[in-house]
Amino acid sequence: MALTPRGPRPPAGHGGRRHSRGDRRRGRRVLRWSAIVLAVAIVGTAGVGYLYYEHLNANIKKDALNIGDEKDRASESEPNAAGQTPLNILLIGSDARNTKENQKLGGAKDTYNTAPRADVQMLVHLSADRTNMSVVSMPRDTLLAIPKCTDPDTGKKYASSTSTMTNASLERGGPGCTVATWEKLTDIHIDHFIMVDFAGVVSMADAIGGVPVCVDANIRSHTSSGHGSGLELERGTTYIKGEQALQWLRTRYGFEDNTDIARAKAQHQYMNSMVRQLRENATLSSPNKLRKLADTATEALTVDEGLGSVTKLYDLSNELRKVPSKRITMTTMPWQYASDGDRVVPKPEEAEKVFRLVREDIALDGKDKKKTTTEDKTSADPAAADDEIAVQVQNGTRTSTQAAVTARAGEVTGLLVGKGFTAAKSDSSVLPSQDKTVVRYPSADLEGDAQRVAKALGVPMSSVKKSTDVSGVTLVVGADWRSGTTYKAAREDDSLPESEDTFNGADTKACMHVNPDFTW
């Protein structure tokens, strides 16, 4: 997870996506997805006594969940028809070098005691009905907008920034700024975060006796200029632990095209393997080893206040372990190269599609049963009377190949007035380009009004979006509604964008491809 120098850009045309019953029961308590197990290793320590319980609680470090501005926050997830609510947890791997152990493991002496960076970021989405889990990684080299953040301890304010590497968000007041950055980018409400450092990764791998990983050739991650994680493995499957496990998670030079994207793929494979190991490894049925695991795990954790106790972590584990491995899907956020040709940025339409699937609680594996449609969802905040809802209507029918339809905003404004929205006004001062018709609103108190406008026009609720770019309810008539008085929404494609970096939690055959320049 450490910050390492960039590798060369891949060649042109690169696709980029590239015992007793009691003992058995205790073993099954362990969480099915590896990174989270740091939060729930304490499950096996139940009954060891109040003082030890308090000792574990004292181990857990806590920080603010979201330190961004309220205007940049995503709306809370809505419950499904059965009243169940999804759960979103951001996993953060910190490259902190603030202790002797972390400095030894992290290398890069020039960054000792500097602010840590979020070199691993994975959003875990637990479905409302607890039948499936989606995990979306973001490459640490992603350039994006980081919102204004305020350090909760010092009060220092960090101004918003544009085109900044996402791992820098952790330097701006703590994990709460990384959470704020994800919410601003994805419009997905994040309920919790869990952060772990170098030492935590190593102690976890040691405690479970090693994690099996596979490479398709001998690998040595080291360059003549001294770059690389130092990972050295023979072809085939090896059980790695300790520093070697950390090397695997940090390796970029040697996997596939030597990019951060390949590293994310290797991290996914490691996580899947750890899941299986945790479920099958009999050593975890030993109370003494479980206590040691609980101690080292809780010492390595930083969480938000909502997860800041053994009890709360245990409750979370009970929710997460309901998901069978075969319904866990891991993928990397769709990306493309930035203008500098080196870093990456979210691939606009495909990344937004992944984020929408998570927002709307649609399983990434495509195996959902039929759910209540988004059109049936309504806001908890009731709408004002139709004639009291002020609506700005903008003409967004312009495309790269077609000019905007003349007076289209005025035509749709007249349609709204005819439906009783007498406060609707046409805004001809801007001519945005919008593929799909959308209704935007700036704050939660206007969400109900925006939904009411959408319902009156037949616009699906998935096209009602919170945005800090508008000051009130704003209807942008898109290129999909260039004429007529009836809006016909295109059928949503709920399939996951094709990617080589998508894994199923039950996959036992994954093997990392070794770059030929790093074999021995």
Image (cartoon, rainbow, N blue to C red):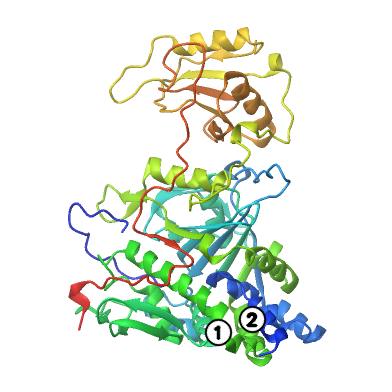
Q: Amino acid at mark 2?
A: Gly
Count of labels in the image = 2
Element type where label 1 sits in the image: loop
In the rendered image, the vertical position of residue 22 relative to residue 85, given as above or below: below
Mark 1–mark 2 distance (CA, rounded to whole Å): 8 Å
Q: Position of residue 458 (x, y in %)?
A: 57, 22
Q: Are marks 1 and 2 in contact (CB under 8 Å)?
A: yes
Q: Position of residue 330 (x, y in %)?
A: 46, 60
Q: Quadrant of the N terminus?
A: bottom left
Between 28 and 485, the residue placed more toward the observer is: 28
Direction right: furthest residue: 50
Which mark is drawn over residue 27?
2
Q: Quadrant of the C terminus?
A: bottom left
Between 120 and 322, the residue placed more toward the observer is: 322
Q: Earlier in the sequence, mark 1 or mark 2?
A: 2
Q: Is residue 393 visible?
A: yes
Which mark is drawn over residue 102?
none
- At 68% from the left and 79% from the top, the residue drawn is 42
Between 280 and 436, the residue placed more toward the observer is: 280
- At 48% from the left and 53% from the top, the residue drawn is 365
Q: Position of residue 225 (x, y in %)?
A: 21, 78
- At 40% from the left and 74% from the top, the residue drawn is 249
Q: Position of residue 376 (x, y in %)?
A: 65, 32
- At 73% from the left and 22% from the top, the residue drawn is 384
Q: Is residue 106 visible?
A: no
Q: Is residue 286 left or right of residue 225?
A: right
Which mark is drawn over residue 281?
1
Q: Quadrant of residue 402?
A: top left
Q: Amino acid at mark 1?
A: Asn
Q: Local crowd at mark 1 within 10 Å, few (<14), some, or many (≥20)? A: some
Q: Is residue 45 left or right of residue 68?
A: right
Element type where label 2 sits in the image: helix
